[in-house]
Amino acid sequence: MVKLVLDYSNVRDANFACKTLGMVHGLTGNGHFPLPWPAEFPSLAAFTAKQKAFADGLAAAADRDKGKVATKNTLRTELQAMVRELGRYLQVKSGGDRTILESTGYDLAKSRVATPPIPDAPQNLKVGPGKETGWVLVRATRSRGARMFEVEYCVGDRSVPANWKIGAQTGTCRKVEIGGLERGKDYAFRMRAFGREGHGPWSNVVVYMPN
């Protein structure tokens, strides 16, 4: 379900004034939220009046007079409370419909993307020379939901499971170093990722001859 942002406490005064004015414009004549609204929530008239009072107070406090600044701060606190209360009504009334909520002038909360329990295969596997003779450097694009990675290498028939050996188990896929390999011999390399519920499929196989 799409949700509204209800907390604007970290937004600067001038931006908050603009944002709440956008809410007033978005809600005025909005057919998704016909008037009158339930009595337990701020009315549109009250919300509009409070927004104007805050905007006027903000302008008046430009000279940094302590009394005017205090008044402006009080008006902001009251307006923020109305934004939260009214937002709860809009959220329920809209049923979480994105199009309807976008018409309110409120910001939409960023939705969290669920992490897959089993990650996809690492992509773009590449193998290159390592730090010294007999070493290689393996790289790949990280899989979403991956917690660790395993690299295997093979000499000979790749269809024989026993020919594959574990070269590394690590928390990164961007710089995996594997040593102890023979120069001038073709090695096949592959990588897979492990998530919270097990490992995903193997990546593509890359054949490389160590220096």
Image (cartoon, rainbow, N blue to C red):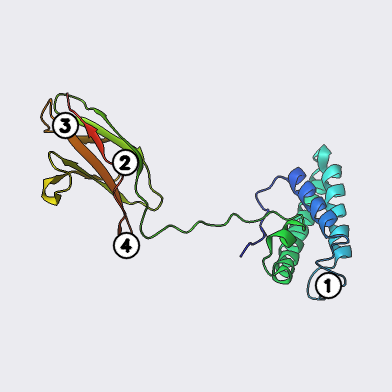
Mark found first going from the N terminus, 2 or 4: 2
Residue 62 showing in the rendered view: yes
Q: Tag 1: Cα neighbours inside 10 Å, few (<14), some, or many (≥20)? A: some
Of badges 4 and 1, the one in the foreground is: 4
48 relative to 91 in the view: left or right: right
Of badges 3 and 1, the one in the foreground is: 3
Question: How far apart, in angstroms, are the residues tagged by discs 3 and 1?
Answer: 74 Å
Question: How far apart, in angstroms, are the residues tagged by discs 2 and 3?
Answer: 22 Å
| Residue underneath mark 1 | 37
**Callout 2, which amino acid?**
Cys
Mark found first going from the N terminus, 4 or 1: 1
| Residue 131 rendering spot, x and y as whole percentages | 21, 25
Residue contact between numbered discs 3 and 4, judged by CB atoms under 8 Å: no
- 164 in relation to 88, above or below: above
Of badges 2 and 3, the one in the foreground is: 3
Q: Count numbered badges in the picture.
A: 4
In depth, the one of 14 and 108 nearer the eye is 108
| Residue underneath mark 2 | 173
Residue at (84, 65) in percent of width and height:
31
Question: How far apart, in angstroms, are the residues tagged by discs 2 and 4?
Answer: 19 Å
**Callout 3, which amino acid?**
Asp
**Callout 4, which amino acid?**
Glu
| Residue underneath mark 4 | 197
Residue 71 showing in the rendered view: no
**Callout 1, which amino acid?**
Trp
- 135 in relation to 141, above or below: above
| Residue underneath mark 3 | 186
Q: Tag 3: Cα neighbours inside 10 Å, few (<14), some, or many (≥20)? A: some
